[in-house]
């Protein structure tokens, strides 16, 4: 059951990111910052999406690039904030 929730969450995150990386199939462990399309507007949209979709609050202390570098890292942040 937990694996299903994990995969569903990662699919939701990947679907959101697809809007920004149209010609690239993102992998769960791929560094999105190395792809070159990350700016402050993207970062703000990502944080707002995660807060709304997963009903979490991302604080200033959470705004570390490493928390958002990969789909796996984003999922770990969501899981940590959901507790």
Image: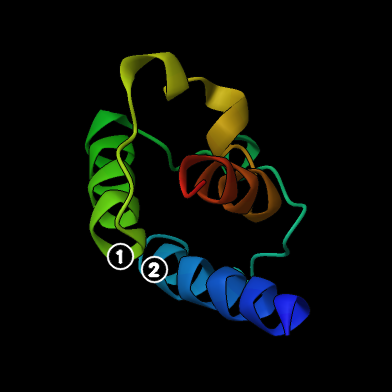
Residue 28, image x, y percentages: 72, 61
Query: Which disc is residue 16 wearing?
Result: 2
Q: Nearer the viewer, residue 57 or 69?
A: 57
Task: Please say if 58 is above or below 31.
Answer: above
Task: Please say if 77 is above or below 63.
Answer: below
Query: Which disc is residue 53 wearing?
Result: 1
Residue 34, image x, y percentages: 64, 36
Q: Residues within 10 Å of mark 1 (few under 14, many from 20)?
A: few
Q: Nearer the viewer, residue 70 or 21?
A: 70
Number of numbered discs overlaid on the protein picture: 2
> Is 1 positioned to the left or the right of 56 in the image?
right
Instruction: Quote the CA–CA distance across marks 2 and 1.
Output: 10 Å
Q: Residues within 10 Å of mark 2 (few under 14, many from 20)?
A: some
Question: Residue at 73% of width from left, 64% of height from top?
Answer: 27
Question: Residue at 39% of width from left, 68% of height from top?
Answer: 16
Q: Secondary structure at mark 1?
A: helix
Q: Residue furthest top?
A: 61
Q: Are marks 2 and 1 in contact (CB under 8 Å)?
A: yes
Q: Secondary structure at mark 2?
A: helix
Q: Nearer the viewer, residue 81 or 13?
A: 81
Residue 57, image x, y percentages: 30, 39
Which badge, 2 or 1, is on the more N-terminal residue?
2
> Is 63 positioned to the left or the right of 64 in the image?
left
Nearest to viewer (mark 2 / mark 1): 1
């Amino acid at each position: 059951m937990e694996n299903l929730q994990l995969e569903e969450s990662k699919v939701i995150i990947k679907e959101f990111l697809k809007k920004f990386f149209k010609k690239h199939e993102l992998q769960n462990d791929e560094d999105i910052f190395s792809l070159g399309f990350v700016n402050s507007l993207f970062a703000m949209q990502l944080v707002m999406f995660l807060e709304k979709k997963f009903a979490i609050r991302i604080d200033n202390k959470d705004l570390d690039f490493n928390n958002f570098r990969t789909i796996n890292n984003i999922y770990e942040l969501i899981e940590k904030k959901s507790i």
